[in-house]
Image: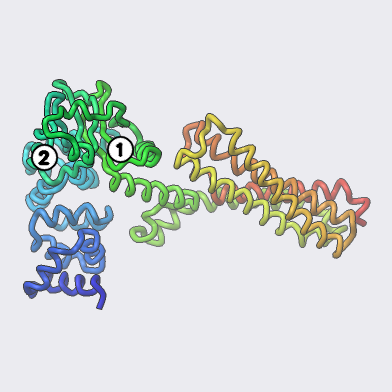
């Protein structure tokens, strides 16, 4: 039996009120993420029973690990007093995430029931814009004044609460302005009488509370940070963001981009009904349908050409598929590059230049392949038509797949939304138009 299976059995026993000392020990030692995974397999009634049986600090560790839907179901099943007591034991930023998911009326009641200091911290965090660094930061940090010695700084760290999880010691002046940071390794190896101010790093990488969480993640990744201070417009230290929070954001944003490119969202996997999923996807499907119907109109316009060289119909889906696939690959790379900061709209020519070179190579190989097949099946003139159509379509699709996301970004739209089915359908129309236009122009040599 695996560790998770044993944990599941212990959770069931706790919910039924028959847990023994071994079950309690297993639940106490389990990581909150593992415990959350186990709760996901139980009924809501059992989840509520387990949450009530756990110590409040343990329940406070568990709640942030649950997904939004499971969290809301649990909170609704508990009364406001129980929820407020659990939130009091949670870090302020995690408590703010829970409160933010609740209906306004219920959130206000719970905030009134919470400890005054904790409630104020949560409300301050909720005042920052959604998806900003302010929502992500922990208002707790370890900082000493400029006149503190190394010995005093170490004592301050020992006396600090364990939830602060300091990776660096920050140095602030009398007005809470950030003036430096001292890595813990340097702090521990320095002479105890040395002023912390003297061994600080002056050039501290920091972010503002209003900065977007994706940008925070890029900064942390760029400078290989394990924690980053958050300062206000006056450079006063207001909180810290640790790398574990950033990892969660990177995962969420990457998943969000992938789902949006498919015309959906992450909630589809486990929370939406088939009807909700259908309504969510319907606009994208209808948009694709309209564009593909345009391709049908174009084919009908060239029906005389097709009737004289029916073999042309065999190559249309090939050119549509290859050009559409090339465009979608370009879109995927550019959307991801924009999300990670590797692609910058201000330097649009760099990814475009690389894509033109890549598309030329791909288009040339694919054109040569279909040209040989066309020559074997029909004639040299036919081979030229299909080869040239393939080369032009692949290059244009790569160009469009690169420029559309960057153009969307520069206009303030989410580039992931403009990709996927729309881009593929667009390339279908483009490929058919180029192919049949060339065939019509060279029809004399094809018949």
Please indicate whether residue 303 sits to the left or right of residue 48 in the image: right
Residue at (17% x, 29% y) in the render: 196
- Graded by Cα atoms within 10 Å as few (under 14), some (14 to 19) or many (20 or more), the crowding at tag 2 reads some
Q: In the displayed image of the protein, which residue is found farthest to the bottom?
A: 1
Which residue bears the numbered disc 2? 118
Residue at (73% x, 55% y) in the render: 366
Q: Nearer the viewer, residue 211 or 291?
A: 211
Residue at (11% x, 51% y) in the render: 86
Q: Quadrant of the C terminus?
A: bottom right
Residue 115, can we see it?
yes
Q: Nearer the viewer, residue 402 or 84?
A: 402
Q: How many marks?
A: 2
Residue 105, can we see it?
no
Q: Quadrant of the N terminus?
A: bottom left
Which residue bears the numbered disc 1? 130
Question: In the rendering, at what x and y percent does residue 176 appear?
Answer: 17, 24
Q: Earlier in the sequence, mark 2 or mark 1?
A: 2
Tell me the element at label 2: helix
Nearest-to-viewer mark from 2 and 1: 2
Question: In the rendering, at what x and y percent does residue 224 appear?
Answer: 36, 41
Q: Nearer the viewer, residue 365 or 107?
A: 365
Residues marked 2 and 1 touching at CB (< 8 Å): no
Within the image, what quadrant is residue 164 found in?
A: top left
Residue at (37% x, 47% y) in the render: 250
Question: In the rendering, at what x and y percent does residue 369 appear?
Answer: 77, 59
- Graded by Cα atoms within 10 Å as few (under 14), some (14 to 19) or many (20 or more), the crowding at tag 1 reads some
């Amino acid at each position: 039996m695996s560790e998770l299976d044993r944990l599941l059995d212990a959770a069931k026993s706790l919910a039924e009120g028959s847990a023994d000392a071994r079950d309690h020990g297993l639940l106490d030692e389990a990581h909150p993420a593992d415990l959350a995974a186990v709760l996901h397999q139980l009924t809501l009634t059992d989840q509520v029973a387990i949450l009530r049986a756990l110590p409040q600090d343990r329940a406070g560790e568990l709640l942030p690990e649950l997904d939004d839907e499971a969290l809301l179901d649990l909170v609704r099943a508990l009364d406001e007093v129980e929820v407020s007591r659990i939130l009091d034991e949670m870090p302020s930023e995690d408590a703010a995430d829970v409160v933010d998911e609740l209906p306004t009326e219920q959130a206000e009641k719970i905030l009134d029931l919470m400890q005054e200091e904790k409630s104020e911290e949560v409300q301050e965090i909720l005042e920052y814009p959604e998806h900003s660094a302010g929502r992500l930061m922990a208002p707790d940090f370890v900082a000493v004044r400029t006149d503190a010695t190394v010995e005093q700084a170490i004592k301050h760290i020992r006396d600090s609460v364990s939830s602060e999880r300091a990776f660096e010691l920050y140095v602030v002046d009398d007005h809470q302005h950030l003036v430096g940071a001292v890595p813990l390794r340097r702090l521990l190896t320095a002479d105890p009488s040395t002023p912390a101010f003297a061994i600080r790093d002056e050039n501290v990488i920091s972010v503002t509370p209003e900065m977007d969480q994706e940008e925070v993640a890029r900064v942390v990744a760029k400078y290989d940070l394990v924690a980053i201070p958050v300062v206000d417009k006056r450079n006063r230290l207001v909180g810290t963001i640790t790398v574990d929070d950033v990892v969660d954001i990177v995962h969420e944003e990457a998943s969000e981009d992938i789902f949006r490119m498919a015309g959906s969202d992450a909630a589809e996997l486990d929370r939406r009904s088939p009807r909700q999923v259908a309504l969510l996807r319907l606009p994208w499907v209808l948009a694709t349908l309209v564009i593909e119907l345009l391709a049908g109109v174009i084919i009908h316009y060239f029906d005389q050409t097709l009737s004289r060289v029916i073999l042309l119909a065999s190559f249309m889906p090939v050119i549509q598929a290859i050009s559409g696939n090339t465009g979608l690959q370009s879109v995927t790379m550019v959307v991801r590059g924009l999300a990670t900061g590797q692609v910058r709209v201000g330097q649009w020519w760099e990814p475009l230049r690389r894509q033109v070179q890549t598309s030329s190579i791909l288009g040339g190989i694919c054109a040569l392949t279909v040209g040989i097949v066309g020559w074997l099946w029909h004639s040299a003139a036919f081979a030229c038509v299909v080869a040239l159509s393939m080369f032009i379509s692949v290059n244009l699709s790569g160009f469009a797949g690169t420029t559309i996301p960057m153009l969307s970004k520069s206009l303030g739209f989410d580039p992931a939304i403009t990709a996927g089915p729309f881009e593929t359908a667009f390339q279908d129309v483009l490929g058919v138009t180029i192919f049949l236009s060339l065939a019509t122009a060279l029809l004399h040599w094809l018949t």
